Amino acid sequence: MKDSLLNTNGGPDDDNPLFGNLDSGSPASIDSLPDDVVVNMKAETVRCNGLMFIGDPHLEARVPGFRCDDYPQVALRKFAWCLEYARQKQLQPILLGDLFHLPQDNPNWMIAEIIDTISRCYGKALPAIYGNHDVRENIRKPNDSISILFAAGHLRLITPEHPWQGTVDGRSVTVGGTVWGDRLPKSFKPSDVTVDDENTSPDLVAWITHHDILIPGYEESGRIRPSVIPGVDMIVNGHIHRRLDHVVKTDDGKSTVWVTAGNITRRARSDASRSHVPAVVCVVPAKRSVSIDDEIVADESIESIDVVSQGGSDWRVCWVRVPHEPFDDVFHDEIQGEDEEQEEFESGFVADLRELTRRKTDTGAGLIDYLDQNLDQFDDAVAAEIRRLADEVTSS
């Protein structure tokens, strides 16, 4: 692994049950084991100061779109920073899906660095769900790269039947999850899955998803309307690349808060990407017993949320900024012509062709944009053949 990728002082603390010393009864790959040998982590096994939800790293070996930096290493460093920050602040990191941008054919060097990052900064069985970019079909298959991480025990799949359970600053917490393509639960009864000896209800139930949630700012693609889910206090959704305002649904005195995390990486050269602040979602008790030295540093540009769980406990949801470079430093600028008077009379076809010939990207983003804007002037059969040839070139 490259020395520049991580800046850590050794591996996980062997004495820390949160990082690197999980209960030996916890399976490394729960989803791959028969039901009769599946054992949940006990609540007392994992103690932490809060939860950290990591949105859509989209790790890829190629430089996407109009990025002009070393995106593969930059994205890996962001992922490593999240796990290292969680370790320093004693937060439980949880992946919201789309760890990979491409589901298959990822190079071995990248998978090896992901494994090394998880092992060095966290340990084993990092809780996660998978997203649409992690799988070639709507369900996970053995050939998907993320299946390697689950099978080897580097990731632990969170499901409704096998949630993460732990203690956050003395409070019992359960985190369930629904993977891409599956239906969200209509309700959740912690007593059906709890392994706590006292069988008590948790102080907080959070649920991680990777879905098209119909919320303000995502109306064009949203399909699932937020509603109250009895037994679930908070939905933390990945999939949507930009952070959007939270939605609170209340019925019969119970509430469910729907939170959109946003990506930790920026892939598209767009206005939405320009305004997006890469950050992780942290959930902590509103009144904490931890010392001031352990306080997380919430981003002042993103408003925190106060949440009262259905069990009556107070929590705070805040965003912690992931270190990143200014937008203009990581994306190619749009080319301006040398002769503005001449360009004033040029067609959009010619102007776009100029940028296409001057910009060459790893993924052929300029070519794809150019075709999207100009193929409608050709017959359907001709346009389809051009698109096929472009896909063949850009995917090779």
Image: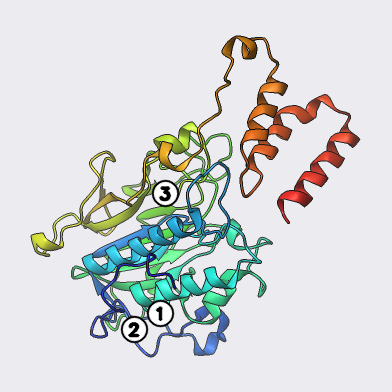
Q: Which mark is residue 228?
A: 3
Element assignment for label 1? loop
Q: Given the image, on which type of amino acid does mark 2 rest?
A: Leu
Residue 135 rendering spot, x and y as whole percentages: 63, 63
User: Quick one: quadrant of the C terminus?
Assistant: bottom right
Residue 180 image offset from top left, x and y in percent: 57, 58
The answer to whether 152 appears left or right of 254 in the picture is: right
Q: To which residue does mark 2 refer?
A: 22
Q: Is residue 84 visible?
A: yes
Residue at mark 2 to residue at mark 3: CA–CA distance: 33 Å
Q: Which mark is residue 124?
A: 1
Q: Residues within 10 Å of mark 2 (few under 14, many from 20)?
A: many
Residue found at x 65% / y 66%: 104
Residue nearer the viewer, 255 or 108: 108
Determine whether the residue tagged by mark 3 lies in a helix, strand or loop: loop
Type of amino acid at the residue the image marks with label 3: Val
User: In the picture provided, is 182 more to the left or to the right than 21?
Assistant: right
Using the image as rendered, state which of residue 324 and residue 25 is in the foreground: 324
Q: Position of residue 381 (x, y in %)?
A: 90, 36
* CB contact under 8 Å: marks 1 and 2: yes
Mark linked to residue 166: none
